[in-house]
Image (cartoon, rainbow, N blue to C red):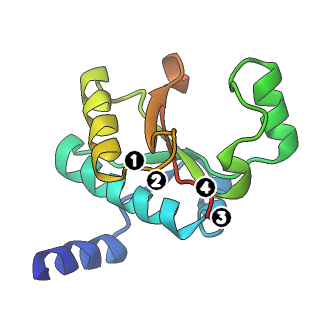
Amino acid sequence: MNNLWQRMHQFLSNPMIKFKSKRQEREFNKVDPRIKALTFYISLYFHENLVKLPVVTSVLRTQREQSSFYRRGLSKIKRSPHMYGRAIDIRLRDIPKNDAIKLVNHVNMYWQRRDKYETALAHGKGAGYHLHIQVPSL
């Protein structure tokens, strides 16, 4: 337990998450605490296994933004957990696909949900390839 405390203290005193912009950094403070905890967990995974800092690219979305994603075919759903502070996207474009798959499998094994959805999935094309993480509504 002492080792975990030391790692969390190191994390909190030297943040290991990058944000695409100040908007994502501000929004991160407003999300569901479970998605925040999962993001911290993933940042430790990045640090220990990929030797990189995760870059958060999307946090909260308005209905207008989600509708735009849906119309352009960038999302298959009209209502996203991003709209409710229960999802975050993390850039994967600089991560080898094999490592991204390992990360997704790792998260889904240790952060299992009880509904029909997975906690993590990797999707998108080219520069838009990202890790989507989500938690269920309460």
In front here: 44 or 107? 107
Q: Which residue carries the number 1 mark? A: 54
Residue 117 screen position, x and y as percent: 51, 39
3D distance between C-alphas at marks 3 and 2: 12 Å
Q: Which residue carries the number 2 mark? A: 18
Residue at position x 65%, y 64% in the image: 26
Which is in the foreground here, disc 4 or disc 1?
4
Q: Amino acid at mark 1?
A: Pro
Kindly state the secondary structure of the residue where label 4 is placed.
loop
N-terminal of the pair, mark 4 or mark 2, is 2
Q: Considering only vertical position in the picture, is 48 above or below 74?
A: below
Task: Examine the image and state in which quarter residue 79 appears.
Answer: top right
The answer to whether the residues at label 4 and label 1 have Cβ atoms under 8 Å apart is: no
N-terminal of the pair, mark 3 or mark 2, is 2
3D distance between C-alphas at marks 1 and 3: 16 Å
The answer to whether the residues at label 3 and label 2 have Cβ atoms under 8 Å apart is: no
In front here: 68 or 57? 68
The answer to whether 83 appears left or right of 35 in the picture is right
Q: Amino acid at mark 3?
A: Arg
Q: Which residue carries the number 4 mark? A: 86
Residue 52 screen position, x and y as percent: 29, 45
Residue at position x 45%, y 33% in the image: 121
The answer to whether 72 appears left or right of 123 in the picture is right
3D distance between C-alphas at marks 1 and 2: 6 Å
